[in-house]
Image (cartoon, rainbow, N blue to C red):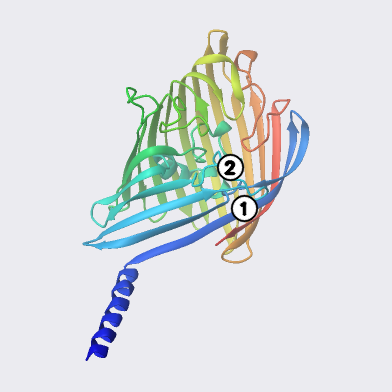
Amino acid sequence: MKRLLITGAAIGCTIVPMAALAQSSVTLYGLIDEGLNYTNNTKQGSAVQMESGFAQGSRWGVKGSEDLGGGTKALFQLENGFDVNSGALGQSSRMFGRQAYIGLSNTKLGTLTMGRQYDSVVDYLAPLTANGNWGGYLLSHPYDNDNTDNSFRLNNSVKYTSNAYGGFSFGGLYGFSNQAGGFADNRSYSLGAQFVAANVSVAAAYMQINNPGGNSGGSLAADDTNFFASRQQVWGAGINYTIGSAKLGFVYSHTALNNATGSVYVGSFANTASSLKFDNFELNAKYQFLKNAFVGAMYNYTIGHFNSAAGDSKPTWHQVGLMADYNLSPRTDVYVQGMYQHLTGGSASAAPLNTAFITGADSPSTTANQVITRVAIRHQF
């Protein structure tokens, strides 16, 4: 009898963990993007370089969920970014610099998460752009001024994402400053919405950050921001329309910075900009000519407005980007990209916004023109 009881207890101990395990899941995943870039003009001359993470950032991560019953799940995601060439951590040497959050989701109420996360511009507007969808880093708007290529993430953030209701969904994020006596210093908030139907996608988003990089523990750290300013605002809207194997898109975005002193891309401005604005107009197209191959193109026109005590300037950027991609397997592809930028209207008062500088280049051109080409391979696991 004792043996039977012991055996029954052992079986019971075995079954309970297996039942719990059946309601949970943890996934290890990743992506490696590596290639060769040629830049025709930097301050050091032309350059041929091995570069990682352009079409998509190289990464690995773990994500999981646990069924809590009643349509509710606990979930988490930890995602690391890294450089393939050196093995170094990305996102300013953060262990999980791409994403790090925990939360709850419900089939009726939506999802609430907390941690280091993407803003609403990235979640809703960026997928309608070339760089935020199929093109990646190289096809960004100048200096990724609207963050549609997710150059930065927001710390200390609480995010709500709705379920889809007849193709319509929405969400918002609030990032805390985490500063005693400075509740509004380096806080952030954003809102976004989208509608997705059979052949059309429409989206709009808004984001504001007060004093980005102003304190190390705030929502946007100094080593993570695109610009240093007293306030940064981004808003925009876009549409994608599918016709057979072709997808056409148009996106407009506006970025406004008050008292901007510089950018992580180009360093300090010659004079503090009392007002720095970017208006981005993008046309993009993607054609899936084979089941495992596509070509894409984008044209972006950006108008800059630089106002300072030393004078005003109105630089404009013309950008043309091209990409061709071929899948060798469901998880491995090869691609080629090219990007051309031409700048007009820059002046000394707006330096260094007076020379061409493609996002992804090591440094600005010495002229008003710059070209980058790339050949690469990408593998997902």
Residue 279, compared with residue 90, is above or below; it is above
Q: Is residue 106 left or right of residue 128?
A: left
Residue 184, compared with residue 118, is above or below; it is above
Q: Secondary structure at mark 1?
A: strand
Q: Which residue is mark 1?
A: 33
Q: Which residue is mark 2?
A: 137
Q: Quadrant of residue 322?
A: top right
Residue 9, compared with residue 327, is above or below; it is below
Q: How far is the residue under mark 2 from the one under mark 1?
A: 12 Å
* Residue at left offset 30%, top offset 69%: 20
The amino acid type found where label 1 is placed reads: Asp
- Residue at the extreme bottom: 1
Which of discs 2 and 1 lies nearer the camera? The answer is 1
Q: Is residue 174 left or right of residue 259?
A: left
Which image quarter is the C terminus in? bottom right
Q: How many marks?
A: 2
Q: Secondary structure at mark 2?
A: helix
Name the one closer to the observer, 236 or 20. Answer: 20
Residue 55 place in picture, x, y as percent: 59, 48
* Residue at left offset 64%, top offset 23%: 344
Residue 255 place in picture, x, y as percent: 46, 28
Dots 2, 1 in contact, CB < 8 A: no
* Residue at left offset 54%, top offset 14%: 272
Name the one closer to the observer, 377 or 325. Answer: 377
Residue 108 place in picture, x, y as percent: 23, 55
The amino acid type found where label 2 is placed reads: Tyr
Residue 309, compared with residue 173, is above or below; it is above
